[in-house]
Image (tube, grey):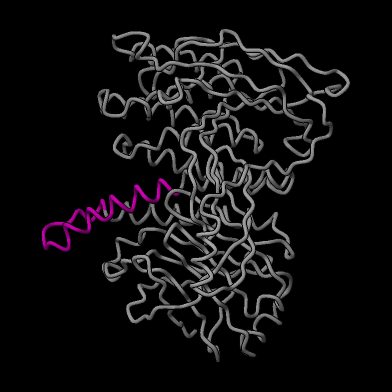
Amino acid sequence: MKELGINTSFKDTKLCKDVAIKKTSIFDKISGKLLKNSTEMTTRHDFDNFVQSIADVKQPIKDNRQNVSDSVPCRCIISPDEGYSLITQFNITCHANTTVLHDTVLYNVYQTSETGKHNMNYLGNIAFFPGKHDMIYLGHSPNMTFLYLHAGHEKENYTYNISISVDREHGLDIVGKCTNLEVKVFPMNMYTSGDVKDVITDLIGSDVNSNDSVINNLMDNGDYSSAVNILGGVASSLNDNVNKSSGEESKQIREVIVFSLTKVSVTSLDDLDLVAGVLNSATSISDELTDYTQDTALDMYSSLTGVLSDQINSTATNKGEESVGLLLDGLSFMLDTNTNKGSEEMKITTNHTHVDTTKVSKVQKSSKKILTLVDSIADAALAITKPTAEPIVFVTDNMNIAVMKKSPANTLGQNLANSRSSNIGQFLLPSDSRFSDVLDNLQGDISLQMMLIDKNPYVWDQSSHDVTTPVVSLKMKTSDKKVVTVTDLQEPVEIQISNRGKMNKSQIHL
């Protein structure tokens, strides 16, 4: 069946007076940002007044999971309480409250920073986003030894917070949060003025064919958590020293990190979060990514997406949403990197000079693979979405994905909106009899996916060069993931999208 997909530059448009306001609640995430929302209509004047009235409001981060016990399940200490990234080996010991922790539990340890927190205007609401969250340990032992921590930020005096939570059955049974810890971690280059490459080489090896390294020995002994912890520390150190070290050396190290991650056994969403966080970090500097790194990373994201699809129905809803956000975060950056590469290649074509068709073909293949993975991840998010629930919008640095599930009757006239700062996209589905007839013949609930991307990812297609607005797409699927095709509507699908800060409206007849 053909998919209902709409991508338009909206050349002949006019200013639209209606915009959407979303009421949001924010949930803490490891990486990426997750917003739950409900939509109502208001006028442009009301919208401006609403934004002004809440401009100074900061909404606190809330954890909506219910703890089994209000008591602190364990008290933890860290030793030493300061050191250097990739040099100092830290140890965390947790003393359990035996009345609460009477059987095997999982310790989830995160290193968090205030840096990066910011307010974002999200369709009128001020969304308060958390700073950086990196999982540094996942395991059953309360004695966490030989941990490498990422360097803190200079503006925070290199100080980090360590957050430790305890759960059973991969998040289905939340025991509670242990006492928070504070630690000061200096960058590795403050420890020595010499070349740090030797330190990194000892830890992870010199290239993808290296067999004699600390992480290889850990993996050979089945200690994947410690190996990933080291890989995360190395990736963080690279990101902290962009433009301060050899670009070619950094490219080679990122190759080793990504290749090493492919060896890690990922069987749960906890494992996925641990690996995806490091994968996102290792691929976050586009200038230091070789073709090998990008190809290997995409294969890894594909593998992780498969784990997500298999496991999301057997884990806690919030845990599943966190994993979705992590994968979308990484793929969003990969898509943006690919789009930029493709744009540069197509500029050559526009200037009537020779274009490397091999490179353009590779960009097309990679972009299509990323968009296919994004579609699969959205399907996974819909698997834990209820028809009566509010829409969910996953916000990344370069794109938003909104998903919702409705009964066929409630799909008629449905409004699905999305926003990226000043960019607003919105679909208003018709309620005519033709559309109603199509939906009445479908079994089960209707899934709606809306994507809003800052840049046009279809850069290999010269006919899309005039698309200068953000790109929006809408997809409707049946309960068995078949795309719904609709034609000959008596009423159009109404689309609203911003163009350089102004709202424009277009109608598409299908």
User: Which of the image's four quarters has the N terminus?
Assistant: bottom right
Quadrant of residue 222 in the image?
A: top right
Q: Which residues are magenta?
A: 332-359
Quadrant position of residue 133: top right
**Main secondary structure type of the part rendered in magenta:** helix
Number of marks drawn: 0
Q: Is residue 283 above or below residue 209?
A: below
What percent of the width, then of the height, locates residue 454?
39, 58
**Outermost residue to the right:** 99
Q: Nearer the viewer, residue 160 or 327?
A: 160
In magenta stretch: residue 341: yes
- Magenta stretch containing residue 144, yes or no? no
Question: Is 106 on the left-hand or right-hand side of 253?
Answer: right
Q: Picture coordinates of residue 269 (x, y %)?
A: 65, 38
Q: Which is more toward the observer, 400 or 44? A: 44
Q: Position of residue 378 (x, y in %)?
A: 58, 56
Q: Is residue 456 above or below residue 254?
A: below
Q: Foreground: 225 or 134?
A: 134
Q: Is residue 157 above or below residue 341?
A: above
Q: Is residue 95 above or below residue 509?
A: above
Q: Image point 55% across, 55% down: which residue?
A: 54
Residue 494 as seen in the image, left or right of residue 336 = right
Identity of the residue drawn at 55% across and 29% down:
112
Q: Nearer the viewer, residue 493 or 268?
A: 493
At x 25%, y 52%, the residue is 358
On the image, the x and y values in percent for residue 101 come to 83, 22
What's the residue at 70%, 76% (across, down)? Answer: 410
